[in-house]
Amino acid sequence: MPIIRNATPEDLAYMHEALFRLNELHHQAEPDYFKPAAEISDHKNLAAYIDKNDAFAFIAKQESIPIGFAVGETRELSSSISKTITMGSIEEIYVEEHYRGTGVGKALYAAIEEHCRNLGATDLLTEVWGFNESALSFYAARGFSTHVHWLRKRL
């Protein structure tokens, strides 16, 4: 079973490398929409998730080897038409390919949910692209349902 712990600045190199791989997966699935990972890899400030009180950054390790990570935040969601809620937002979650299906994602998710509950979140939200059927299944198995449909038509 993997060890899940809070990420530290020493984990950032791995997290950026893993985010590169995640971005490349999106580019390969939707090359007309997503830029190549090399063009966007430096745009996300993962250190901010380690430093902020209302954010989270978890690292999954097998022995001393990093095998996955997750980042996100807890914040209030409000609009002119909806009631205000405290929500957790999963911004990125990634598990190395060799470890997928072994419980690493489940362990990362459990840490996220516990963290968000402890900060008073009543809801947990994330974005999943339609092509990512394994992620859709993963979240559905944890009780997620469609919240908003974003529709797109290529012209």
Image (cartoon, rainbow, N blue to C red):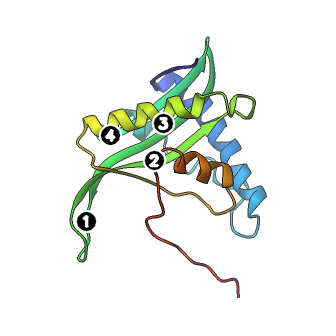
Assign the N terminus to one quadrant of the image: top right
Mark 2: few/some/many CA within 10 Å (<14, 14-19, 20+)? many
- Which image quadrant is residue 39 in? bottom right
Residue carrying label 3: 109
Q: Residue 90's mark?
A: 2
Give the Cα separation between the discs numbered 3 and 2: 9 Å
**Which of pointers 4 and 3 lies earlier in the amino acid sequence?**
3
Label 4 to label 3: alpha-carbon separation: 11 Å
- For the question of whether residue 38 can be seen, the reply is no
Near-viewer residue (18 or 5): 5
Few, some or many residues within 10 Å of mark 3 (<14, 14–19, 20+): many
Horizontal and vertical percent for residue 152? 61, 79
- Mark 1 crowdedness (10 Å alpha carbons): few <14, some 14-19, many ≥20: few
Give the residue type that dot 3 points to.
Tyr
Quadrant position of residue 49: top left
Image quadrant containing the C terminus: bottom right
Given residues 69 and 131, the one toward you in this image is 131
Q: Is mark 2 on a helix, strand or loop?
A: strand
Relative image position of residue 20 (x, y in whole percent): 67, 43
> Callout 3: helix, strand or loop?
helix
At label 4, counting other C-alpha atoms closer than 10 Å, the crowd grade (few under 14, some 14-19, many 20 or more) is: many
Q: Which residue is pictured at 63% across the width and 48% down the height?
A: 41
In terms of sequence position, does the residue under pointer 3 or pointer 1 come before the other?
1
Position of residue 33 relative to residue 112, above or below, is below
Say left or right for 120 vs 14.
left
Instruction: Between label 3 and label 2, give the one nearer the viewer.
Output: 3
